[in-house]
Image (tube, rainbow, N blue to C red):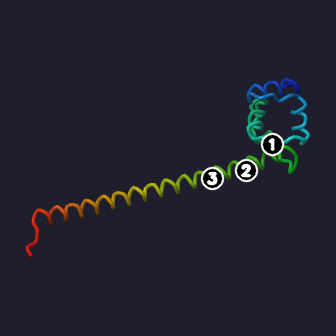
Amino acid sequence: MGLSQAEVAERLSARLEVTIDKSALARMERGERSIRLNEAVALAEVLQVTLLRLVGESGSGPSARVRRALHGLENAEVLLRAATEEVERRGVQVEEARARLAEVENRELAEDLRAEQWPMGD
């Protein structure tokens, strides 16, 4: 793509709506500054590469930190989906319990009304 470090920093800043100067970008490249996930996504967009291509295959440095952050995000999303499904299951159980309660209340009310209308003789 042929962008200078200053151009990348400028485009990255515009995407993130915060200032990322070229020295901060250089520190990211050297692994001296942590890269947040949103910064990595924006950087991949600026460079017009996939996030996986951006993080590369090395076992250390900024790329490895981005991969770990991505892995953490994926794990969090899996846990969120599982929790959401559990909440939905519990919601169904609550609605079923409410329906059973209403049924029992209605039955008892009907029995009370019948008892009032046709009292048993003493």
Tell me the amino acid under the disc marked 3. Answer: Val
Looking at the rendered image, the disc whose residue lies closer to the viewer, 1 or 3, is 3
At which x and y percent is residue 25? 87, 33
Question: Dot 3: what SS?
Answer: helix
In primary-sequence order, the first of circles 1 and 3 is 1
Q: CA distance from mark 3 to mark 2?
A: 11 Å
Instruction: Please tell me which residue is depicted at 86% across the width and 48% down the height of the picture.
Output: 58
Residue 49: quarter of image: top right
Instruction: Please tell me which residue is depicted at 78% across the width and 27% down the height of the picture.
Output: 13
At which x and y percent is residue 120? 10, 72
In primary-sequence order, the first of circles 3 and 2 is 2
Query: Does the residue at mark 3 contact the one at mark 2 (Cβ under 8 Å)?
Result: no
Tell me the amino acid under the disc marked 1. Answer: Val
Is 12 positioned to the left or the right of 81 in the image? right
Is 74 positioned to the left or the right of 108 in the image? right
At which x and y percent is residue 89? 48, 57
Q: Which residue is mark 2?
A: 71
Up/down of 77 relative to 50, above or below: below
Q: CA distance from mark 2 to mark 1?
A: 12 Å
Q: Which residue is mark 1?
A: 55
Instruction: Please tell me which residue is depicted at 85% across the width and 43% down the height of the picture.
Output: 62
Q: Which residue is mark 3?
A: 78
In primary-sequence order, the first of circles 2 and 1 is 1
Q: CA distance from mark 1 to mark 3?
A: 22 Å
